[in-house]
Image (cartoon, helix red, strand yellow):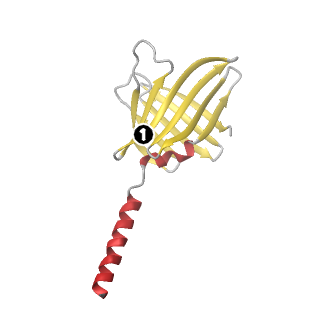
């Protein structure tokens, strides 16, 4: 009886350890959630992120100048097996432009790097959590880069 109880305990311990090791890649971006804004004299660039389900975060990006939306896109962070994909779709999709997929290539608890080396621009998208109310996003590639400091808006 003691052997059976010991084996059951060991089996339960192994299963619980395996469950903890199946950490979802999309959870690395929990700090994205909410609304973020970059207000400048020229206009406001905003991103709003929410949980779509346990393996997908949905984001919307807009650049607004004097009540006119100059640029708009949606982004999905999708857990695909052991990878995290950042899939961008412009709104409205123009001239047959298809969504562009970037793959998570590096991460820490406050820094995420997504890359697509065959895309024209950007080839790299990074997000850095500066503090709980501030993050810095950057797009780069082929010697060019553009940064976006965001403040939490909600």
Q: Indicate the position of residue 115 as horizontal and vertical percent values.
A: 40, 34
| Mark 1 crowdedness (10 Å alpha carbons): few <14, some 14-19, many ≥20 | many
Tell me if residue 75 comes above or below residue 65 in the rendering: below
Q: Quadrant of the N terminus?
A: bottom left
Give the residue number, with chain letter if any, for mark 1. Answer: 78
Residue closest to the eye, 153 or 9: 9
Which residue in the rendered view is the most extreme toward the top?
95
Residue 87, percent from left and from top? 43, 31
Q: Residue 91 appears at what percent x and percent y? A: 51, 20
Residue ID at (32%, 82%): 6
Q: Is residue 12 left or right of residue 26?
A: left
Q: Is the residue 149 above or below the residue 12 in the image?
A: above
Could you say which is closer to the camera, residue 65 or residue 74? 74
**Outermost residue, bottom side:** 2
For the C terminus, which image quadrant? top right
Please tell me in which quadrant of the rendered image residue 12 appears.
bottom left
Q: Position of residue 4 (x, y in %)?
A: 29, 82
Residue at the image point whose x is 46% and y is 25% from the top: 89
User: Front-most of 130 and 50?
Assistant: 50
Horizontal side of residue 49 vs 78, given as left or right: right
């Amino acid at each position: 009886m003691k052997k059976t109880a010991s084996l059951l305990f060991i089996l339960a311990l192994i299963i619980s350890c395996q469950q903890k090791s199946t950490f979802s890649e999309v959870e690395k971006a929990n700090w994205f959630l909410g609304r973020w804004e970059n207000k400048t004299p020229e206009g406001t660039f905003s991103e709003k992120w929410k949980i779509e389900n346990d393996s997908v975060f949905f984001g919307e990006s807009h650049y607004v100048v004097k009540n006119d939306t100059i640029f708009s896109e949606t982004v999905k962070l999708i857990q695909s097996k052991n990878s995290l994909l950042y899939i961008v779709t412009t709104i409205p999709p123009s001239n047959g432009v298809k969504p562009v997929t970037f793959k998570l290539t590096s991460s820490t608890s406050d820094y995420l790097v997504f890359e697509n080396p065959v895309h024209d621009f950007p080839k790299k998208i990074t997000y850095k959590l500066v503090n709980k109310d501030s993050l810095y996003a950057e797009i780069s590639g082929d010697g060019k880069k553009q940064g976006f400091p965001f403040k939490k808006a909600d």
